[in-house]
Image (cartoon, helix red, strand yellow):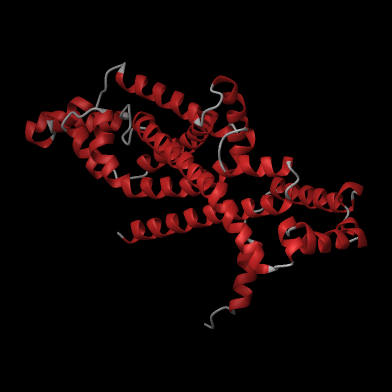
Amino acid sequence: MKPEPRNQRIKELHSQRPRSFGLRLGGILMAGLVFYSLISPSLHLQTLFALERRSNLHRFLTQDLLPQSVQRDGSGLTGWLAWAWSVLQERALLASAQTLGLALVAIVIAAGTAALLATLAAREDFPQKPSRPTESRGDAASDAGPSLTPAGARKRAAPGPGEGGQHALIGRGLRLGFGLTRSLPEYLLAFLLVALLPHTAWPAVLALALHNGGILGRLFTETLENVPAGPSTSLRSIGAGAASTTLLARWPEAFTRALSLTFYRFETCVRDATVLGMVGIGSIGYLVVEARARQDVPEQFLLVLCGATIVLISDLLSRIVRRRLRVA
């Protein structure tokens, strides 16, 4: 018997794949919205490549990006580098350090709080109410002799009316809180907190910590729930509580993964910290807004490049650490 041709088998599998009407309808609607956006007057492609736009781009690259001192002296690239170094020494380097400091403090607060709350929010890794066949097997084992069924396991087979329900209720409330805090944009949080804590960096720190704490709390909780159940089951069999089991059995297994997720959120935290300066907090974003108010396009462009450099450096460091953690 000859084997089926490979192409024919692929076609059969393709025809047998599950199809979703809702998914197809959503794809058609999305394609229609994209097409409408491209042909709408407010976002027409012809306006992007018009002659006026090209002349504006040429003026921006040849005149607007050059400081007035460089244009007067005609020093070219050497003069621009000297001007850029003076701006970096006077303002940009200090603002860059402040941006990194904001992100670092925020991610430490977010990760520490998320780890503590995730310990309480993680679901149990064993059934709260054993089924009837399990109870009958346990009774039979106890009739056969005490050596077949550990006393601790028998004790945990029927948890009290308060412990399991209370832990589940706390977990649901914490998971709801994680969803609420991660759904709030950092910029809006900082804008509201500036009215409560003016002239300080705490609005940016708390805004970043709340948003990233919600994200890390959800990720830490899922990580704890997906670790191997062997160590947890052993501790539960000798009567350990839910929090003790999570702290002593789950966290050692999940620590490397949680640390990798923390560094991943750190790189996004640095990027968001550069933007939060636009609400009046000392960082790169604040200097960008200040330069825009003075209509100083060269300094504004230099500060944007400085902020992008900070984000790239933090991203590189985060990738190195996460790669080493995966290898370890």
* Residue pictured at 39% horizontal, 43% vertical: 223
Residue 88 x %, y % = 56, 53
* Residue pictured at 34% horizontal, 56% vertical: 325
Judged left or right of residue 61, residue 322 is left
* 8, 50: nearer the viewer: 50
* 317, 88: nearer the viewer: 88
| Residue 307 seen by the camera | yes
Q: Against 120, is 106 above or below?
A: below
Q: Against 225, is 153 above or below?
A: above
Residue 27 x %, y % = 74, 51
Residue 256 x %, y % = 33, 49
Judged left or right of residue 132, residue 57 is right
**Number of labelled discs?**
0
Quarter of the picture containing the C terminus is bottom left
Q: Which residue lies furthest to the front in this view?
A: 73
* Residue pictured at 15% horizontal, 32% vertical: 238
* 232, 100: nearer the viewer: 100
Q: Residue furthest top?
A: 162
